[in-house]
Image (spheres, coloured by chain):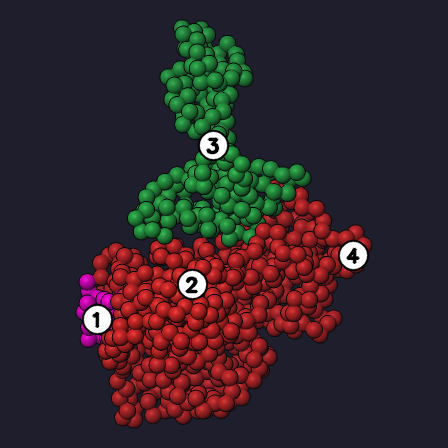
């Protein structure tokens, strides 16, 4: 390992293909907590017919040496089939979905906020999935920083609650895990 | 998440009670002995054991000891050690042993009882979340919830325990699975679906390693427990390679015996209590070859000053051990034995000569370091003189030379362990069992039991301290029951010696709670457990006691009163570098300079 870049800090999006068996998520999460690694985001779902295998997408951060350790440690878990560092192996797509509740009552002069929230939602291509005279729920899919930006904009307009899925990621082109 | 794997058993597979299926699977895996302790949830297994003779059960006195005994069995035979304990406290008591086996890469399969599946999660009597508790203490674990998984899981557990970097595997067995009928399936002939560790090293990388080694002016070979785990052939390949190269070699605590200690190319053990020459050669080398060792903190000392001028090659079967503590220039994943055999072949295939004058100069430097005679000690010989602990080990070693039997040494943890590593010379692998990674006091006696079970005619000696031995002293009962002639050689300095040493060197001599108060009379204790008790209080009594111990065909406790003030040297103080090691109490003043940062490093 070259000495010059082992201490550079980076974010990594790691995809892990695992047997869908009891305790596998505890194994992965326990590995991260037990060895003091960061988890910025984690998603998991069965991805194959019959539900035999699941894919775990983990966004983590650390020095190059730590990220290489994380990959090696994941790879030696017995139910792990493959580990892929999407952010290092080539271009990739990373998306998450968010539902965001904004409370801006029609009365008490909140009408301006309602209109503004709708305009911004339109600009960010968020969909209105629930509306009352006092609130909206927007649904939005995109990269993490886009979702963050939309949340920042909604804060002064009455942001009340957020539910996010965490990142799902996949390589661009023909490359598969 | 749900378990959706389809049953892999043919519908017409023969069925039997789960406990019978379990024993059949164990027999198919070549198991001949279990170390265990019965309890409510494993009664069906004990019932099945009662009706057969193929598998022998050794009844221990505490579940921790069952695991250590299985470790001793595994390390002295190269086979998987098997443990059987009940649910709840049986399983939790086994956790220390499992963690010990994980840290030292020892193949163990531990069968734990569990409450019936319908009671799991109900806080039933003797229920514990065994798979949850042992997840970070094992290489892998299983909870068998369906009868059709039972046989497959047992075969898979043995495969996982012994493959790649070996380790402990737990199989949690609910009582209804043991009682109900289950189909039997033989071991799978297809490769495991996900766990296939790489054992064959990349030939191109081996060739590059040889090129690096041939270009070296100050080469050093450092090998660890991986060479032992790879089997006796790996040690033979190491000897061939080292002799072929003419390079110096050192072993870690776990790796002792892989290279004959009497060989002139052997520099002794390295690390915190390693030899002066081994540590300075590590510090001064220009090419470092690590085979099957993991740059443990006891070995490296201060990381940023570890072997600063060397290009490093690291061969390990576990990719996560590479570039974990020390960045290396050439990582090679593979089995230590196969890698060493490949190195021997590649060395012969590469016509480049080594730099003979440079290597000769390097050896002159090493010989100068050897000249400090870092393991020197002074033993007063007048009758009545107090015994130096180093002398006790040296005499034990000398007097066992005449013994015709195979000799196995186990230890507890502390000063006596380091003295045993320094003064007992190991010539072959699998004859030295000590708790390296976890540092488990109480390891040595049960491990010796396991070794003696595997090698009934061998001489098995537990080199112990008076504090450590008390941690699993109940196993004297097991020795008595099975008439195991294990010799317990206690270096009795009335202190938790290593704790006392650190308190002396780093905490102003405030011996907080490290005095072994209210010790038992070990002779009476031996007597109570149907063993022989001996005691040596002065230098003139030592040889007689050792001879009497070796001559006995029974279990023996030899209580050797040694100098209570003796410290274990040489020593690299915590947070220091290899070239800052202190050689003896005369130079221990240097330890005063250990910073709080160093003290944090245990």
Q: Which range of residues does the magenta coloring cover? A: B578-593
Magenta-drawn stretch, dominant element (helix, strand or loop):
helix
Which chain letter matches label 1?
Answer: B
Q: Is residue B591 left or right of B30 when viewed as pictured?
A: left
Which chain letter matches label 2?
Answer: B
Label 3 sits on a secondary structure element that is: strand
Mark found first going from the N terminus, 1 or 4? 4
Chain letter tied to red: B
Q: Are marks 2 and 4 in contact (CB under 8 Å)?
A: no
Nearer mark to the viewer, of 3 and 1:
3
Q: Is residue B386 above or below residue B567?
A: below
Q: CA distance from mark 4 to mark 3?
A: 47 Å
Q: CA distance from mark 2 to mark 1?
A: 45 Å
- Residue position for label 3: A94
> Crowding at label 1, few (<14), some or many (≥20) Cα neighbours within 10 Å?
some
- Residue position for label 2: B207
Q: Are marks 1 and 4 in contact (CB under 8 Å)?
A: no
């Amino acid at each position: 390992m070259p000495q010059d870049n082992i201490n550079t800090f980076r974010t990594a999006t790691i995809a892990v293909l695992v047997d869908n068996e009891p305790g596998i998520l505890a194994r992965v999460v326990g590995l991260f907590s037990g060895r003091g690694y960061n988890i910025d985001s984690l998603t998991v779902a069965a991805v194959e017919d019959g539900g035999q295998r699941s894919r775990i997408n983990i966004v983590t951060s650390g020095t190059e040496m730590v990220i290489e350790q994380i990959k090696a440690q994941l790879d030696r878990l017995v139910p792990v089939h493959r580990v892929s560092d999407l952010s290092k192996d080539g271009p990739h797509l990373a998306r998450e979905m968010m539902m965001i509740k904004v409370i801006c009552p029609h009365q008490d002069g909140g009408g301006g906020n309602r209109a503004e929230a709708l305009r911004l939602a339109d600009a960010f291509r968020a969909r209105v999935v629930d509306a009352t005279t006092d609130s909206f729920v927007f649904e939005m899919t995109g990269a993490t920083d886009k979702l963050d930006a939309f949340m920042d904009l909604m804060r002064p307009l009455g942001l009340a609650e957020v539910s996010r899925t965490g990142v799902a990621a996949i390589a661009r082109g023909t490359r598969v895990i | 998440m749900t378990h959706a794997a389809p049953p892999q058993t043919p519908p017409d597979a023969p069925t039997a009670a789960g406990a019978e299926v379990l024993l059949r699977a164990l027999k198919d895996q070549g198991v001949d002995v279990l170390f265990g302790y019965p309890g409510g949830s494993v009664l069906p297994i004990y019932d099945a054991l009662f009706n057969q003779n193929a598998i022998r059960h050794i009844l221990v006195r505490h579940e921790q000891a069952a695991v250590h005994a299985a470790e001793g069995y595994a390390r002295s035979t190269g086979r998987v050690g098997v443990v059987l304990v009940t649910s709840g406290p049986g399983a939790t008591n086994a956790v220390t042993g499992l963690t010990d086996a994980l840290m030292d890469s020892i193949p163990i399969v531990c069968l734990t009882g569990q409450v019936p599946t319908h009671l799991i999660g109900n806080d039933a009597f003797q229920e514990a979340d065994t798979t949850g508790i042992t997840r970070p203490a094992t290489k892998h674990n299983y909870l068998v919830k369906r009868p059709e998984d039972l046989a497959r899981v047992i075969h898979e557990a043995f495969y996982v325990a012994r493959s790649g970097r070996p380790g402990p595997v737990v199989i949690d067995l609910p009582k209804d699975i043991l009682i109900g009928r289950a189909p039997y399936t033989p071991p799978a002939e297809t490769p495991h679906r996900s766990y296939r560790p790489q054992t064959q090293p990349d030939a191109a990388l081996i060739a590059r390693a040889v090129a690096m080694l041939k270009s070296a002016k100050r080469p050093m070979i450092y090998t660890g427990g991986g060479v032992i785990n790879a089997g006796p052939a790996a040690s033979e390949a190491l000897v061939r390679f080292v002799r072929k190269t003419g390079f110096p070699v050192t072993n870690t605590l776990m790796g002792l015996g892989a290279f004959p200690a009497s060989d002139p190319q052997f520099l002794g053990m390295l690390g915190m209590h390693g030899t002066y020459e081994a540590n300075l050669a590590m510090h001064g080398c220009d090419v470092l070859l690590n085979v099957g060792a993991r740059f443990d903190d006891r070995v490296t000392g201060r990381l940023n000053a570890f072997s600063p001028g060397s290009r490093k090659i690291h061969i390990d079967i576990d990719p996560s051990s590479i570039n974990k503590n020390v960045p290396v220039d050439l990582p090679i994943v593979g089995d230590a034995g196969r890698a060493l055999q490949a190195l021997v072949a590649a060395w012969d295939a590469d016509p480049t000569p080594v730099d003979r004058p440079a290597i000769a100069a390097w050896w002159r430097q090493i010989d100068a370091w050897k000249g400090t005679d870092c393991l020197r000690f002074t033993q007063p010989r007048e009758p009545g003189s107090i015994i130096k602990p180093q002398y006790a080990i040296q005499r034990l070693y000398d007097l066992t030379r005449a013994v015709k039997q195979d000799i196995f040494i186990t230890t507890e943890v502390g000063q006596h362990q380091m003295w045993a590593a320094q003064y007992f010379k190991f010539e072959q692998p699998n004859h030295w069992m000590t708790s390296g990674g976890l540092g488990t006091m109480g390891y040595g006696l049960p491990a010796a039991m396991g070794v003696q079970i595997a090698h009934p005619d061998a001489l098995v000696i537990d080199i112990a301290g008076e504090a450590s031995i008390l941690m699993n002293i109940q196993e004297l009962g097991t020795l008595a029951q099975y008439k195991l002639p294990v010799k317990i050689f206690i270096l009795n300095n009335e202190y938790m010696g290593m704790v006392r040493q650190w308190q002396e060197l780093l905490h102003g001599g405030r011996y907080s709670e490290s005095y072994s108060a209210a010790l038992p009379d070990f002779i009476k204790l031996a007597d109570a457990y149907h063993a022989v008790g001996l005691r040596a209080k002065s230098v003139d009594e030592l040889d007689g006691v050792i001879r009497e111990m070796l001559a006995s065909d029974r279990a023996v406790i030899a209580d050797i009163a040694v100098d209570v003030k003796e410290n274990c040297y040489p020593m690299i103080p915590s947070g220091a570098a290899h070239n800052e090691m202190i050689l003896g109490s005369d130079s221990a003043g240097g330890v005063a300079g250990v910073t709080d940062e160093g003290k944090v490093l245990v």
